[in-house]
Image (cartoon, rainbow, N blue to C red):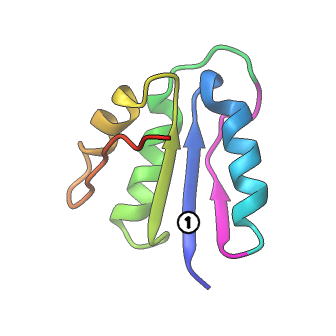
Amino acid sequence: MKKIAIASDHAGFDYKEILKKYLENKFEVQDFGTYTKDSVDYPDFVHPAATSVENGTNELGILICGSGEGVAITANKNQGNRGALGGK
């Protein structure tokens, strides 16, 4: 079963929870947070998720925030990761 890392900031929390429930039927999902709608600094959650993909603990990562730009930039700071914006 594929392993997927998932993380979000407070703006993406609701979407993360919906997506996580959907994915858990098909993949092994590791949730790196955030775990509430309280305001947070997204790098605190994105860096560990991206690192887990970089070191092979997880095969893929999904990062969700208000705009998507900040999490993509943060993920791209890890070697071998390619973060990009996804659309609707």
Question: Label 1, on which residue?
Answer: 4
Residue depicted at 62% across the width and 85% down the height:
1
Q: State the image coordinates of residue 5 (x, y, percent, origin top left).
A: 55, 58
Looking at this view, name the residue that lies furthest to the bottom: 1
Residue 34 found in image quarter: top right
- Compared with 75, 82 (above or below) is below
Residue depicted at 49% across the width and 43% down the height:
63
Q: Please count the marks in the image.
A: 1
Residue depicted at 69% across the width and 32% down the height:
13
Q: State the image coordinates of residue 28 (x, y, percent, origin top left).
A: 67, 73
Crowd around label 1: few <14 · some 14–19 · many ≥20 (10 Å): many
Q: Is residue 60 left or right of residue 35?
A: left
The span picked out in magenta is: 26-36
* Helix, strand or loop at mark 1: strand
Looking at this view, name the residue that lies furthest to the front: 88
Q: Is residue 81 left or right of residue 55?
A: left
Residue 35 within the segment the image draws in magenta: yes
- Compared with 77, 27 (above or below) is below
Q: State the image coordinates of residue 51 (x, y, percent, origin top left).
A: 39, 55
Residue 22 within the segment the image draws in magenta: no
Looking at this view, name the residue that lies furthest to the top: 39
Residue 22 found in image quarter: bottom right
Residue depicted at 75% across the width and 67% down the height:
24
Q: State the image coordinates of residue 31 (x, y, percent, origin top left).
A: 66, 52
Q: Amino acid at mark 1?
A: Ile
Q: Predominant secondary structure in magenta?
A: loop
